[in-house]
Image (spheres, rainbow, N blue to C red):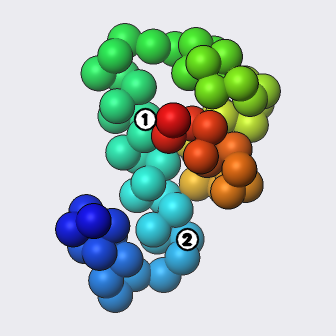
Amino acid sequence: MAIVVSMLSLRSAPEVAAELAQRVRARRLQRAWTQAEMARRAGIREATYVLFERTGKISLLRLLKVLD
């Protein structure tokens, strides 16, 4: 919970989305997964995942799949 609070304090929505995408990307790289592998494991299209990493834009339902 502290991570979420620190992420949200004094930041705009696009800034929070970009930081979240960076953190998910870092976790993916730690696991040595490609973007295609991450998308496959999350059950979403690779293009959707790539867009998320690049822009932070993703639907809430798809984000929950990625974080699962």
State the separation of the CA atoms marked 2 and 1.
16 Å
Whether residue 32 is situated above or below residue 51 in the rendered picture:
above
Q: Is residue 12 visible?
A: yes
Instruction: Residue 32: give x, y in percent of width and height.
Output: 37, 12
Q: Where is 17 relative to 10, above or below? A: above
Mark 2 is on which residue type? Pro
| Left or right position of 26 against 21 | left
Q: Is residue 51 above or below residue 2?
A: above
Q: Which numbered dot is residue 49?
A: none
Whether residue 56 sits left or right of residue 59 in the image: it is left
- Please state, as top left, top right, bottom left or bottom right, where the N terminus lies in the image: bottom left
Residue 34 appears at what percent x and percent y? 52, 14
At horizontal 43% and vertical 35% (from top left) the residue drawn is: 25
Q: Secondary structure at mark 2?
A: helix
Q: Which residue is mark 1?
A: 25
Query: Can residue 52 be seen here?
Result: no
43 on left or right of 9: right
The residue shown at (60%, 18%) is 41
- Classify mark 2: residues with Cα within 10 Å, few (<14), some (14-19) or many (20+): few
**Residue 38 at what x, y percent from top left?**
56, 21
Q: Residue at x 71, y 24 (%)?
A: 43
Residue with the most extreme bottom position: 10
Q: Residue furthest left?
A: 2
Whichever of labels 2 and 1 marks the residue nearer the N terminus, that label is: 2
Label 1 secondary element: helix
- Image point 66% across, 16% down: which residue? 40
Q: Amino acid at mark 1?
A: Arg
Q: Which residue is mark 2?
A: 14
Image height check: is 25 above or below 41?
below
The image quadrant that residue 59 belongs to is: bottom right
> Dot 1 surroundings within 10 Å: few (below 14), some, or many (20 or more)?
many
